[in-house]
Amino acid sequence: MEAIDAIMKRRSIRKFEKRQIPDAILEKIIKTGTYAPSALALQPWGFVVVQDQVFLNRVSDYCKPILISFMKNAHDGMSDAFRAVLEGKDYSIYYHAPTVIMVIGKTGSRFREIDCSLCAENMMLAAHALGIGSCWIGSTEVAYDNKELMAGFRIPEGYSPVGTIVFGYPAETVDAHDKKAPLLTWIR
Ligand SMILES: Cc1cc2nc3c(=O)[nH]c(=O)nc-3n(C[C@H](O)[C@H](O)[C@H](O)COP(=O)(O)O)c2cc1C
């Protein structure tokens, strides 16, 4: 797949087949992440691959009521729709994806969030090029202050989470969309 095509046709995927992604493919996706640029070439990232659905459901069940409470005063169309989805009994913030990868960054590394986000985007684009869907799950953040749940992610000493991404074979097709015209200034 051409790079431009992969960039412009990638969409967040939220419905997945149950079959697991082979380890070799996940390793390839992670490797593409490590080819991202990073400040001073520090490569301050690490990865936690979670395939334990019982654990992921526990994290999701903890996050859901907190997310619902965050949204209690938001009543635009998108928020109402998201709240209705969140309140669904079967809803998981991880969309029951077979693999969730937490990208972790070296604590104190100055550009860790930027470096790890570039790494994460490489991974999502590579996944798309390999026929695998993905979606960044910012909702995990509400669990960051839950020590017991965070211990379950087994983050090595000296690292902390930057982002969590779900991966799986897509069980839905989502068309490429038009994006807003960019705010653009030329100086020349
Ligand atoms: C930092 C960040 C956090 C996100 N958190 C969530 C999330 O918790 N749940 C979700 O379903 N999608 C989440 N998304 C996906 C966005 O909703 C999605 O990227 C956006 O709607 C644009 O759609 P596209 O990825 O298909 O282009 C997140 C994306 C980013 C970059």
Image (cartoon, rainbow, N blue to C red):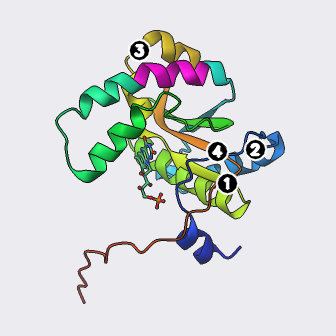
Mark 2, secondary structure of its residue? helix
Quarter of the N terminus within the rendering? bottom right
Residue with the mark numbered 4:
167
**Which range is magenta?**
55-63
Asked if 171 appears above or below 70 in the picture, the reply is below
Asked if 43 appears above or below 68 in the picture, the reply is below
Dividing the picture into quarters, in which one does residue 37 lie? bottom right
In the image, residue 6 lies at what x, y percent? 61, 70
Task: State which tag comes first along the sequence, 3 or 2.
Answer: 2
CA separation in Å, label 3 and label 2: 29 Å
Mark 1, secondary structure of its residue? helix
Residue with the mark numbered 2:
27
CA separation in Å, label 3 and label 1: 31 Å
Q: Residue furthest top?
A: 148
Task: State which tag comes first along the sequence, 4 or 3.
Answer: 3
CA separation in Å, label 4 and label 3: 24 Å
Q: Nearer the viewer, residue 33 or 188?
A: 33
Ligand 1: does it lie within 8 Å of the C-beta at label 3? no
4 and 2 marks in contact (CB < 8 Å)? no
Residue with the mark numbered 3:
146
| Magenta portion: prevailing SS class | helix
Name the kind of residue labelled 1 in the image.
Thr
CA separation in Å, label 4 and label 1: 15 Å
Is residue 141 found inside the magenta-colored segment of the image?
Answer: no
Name the kind of residue labelled 3 in the image.
Asn
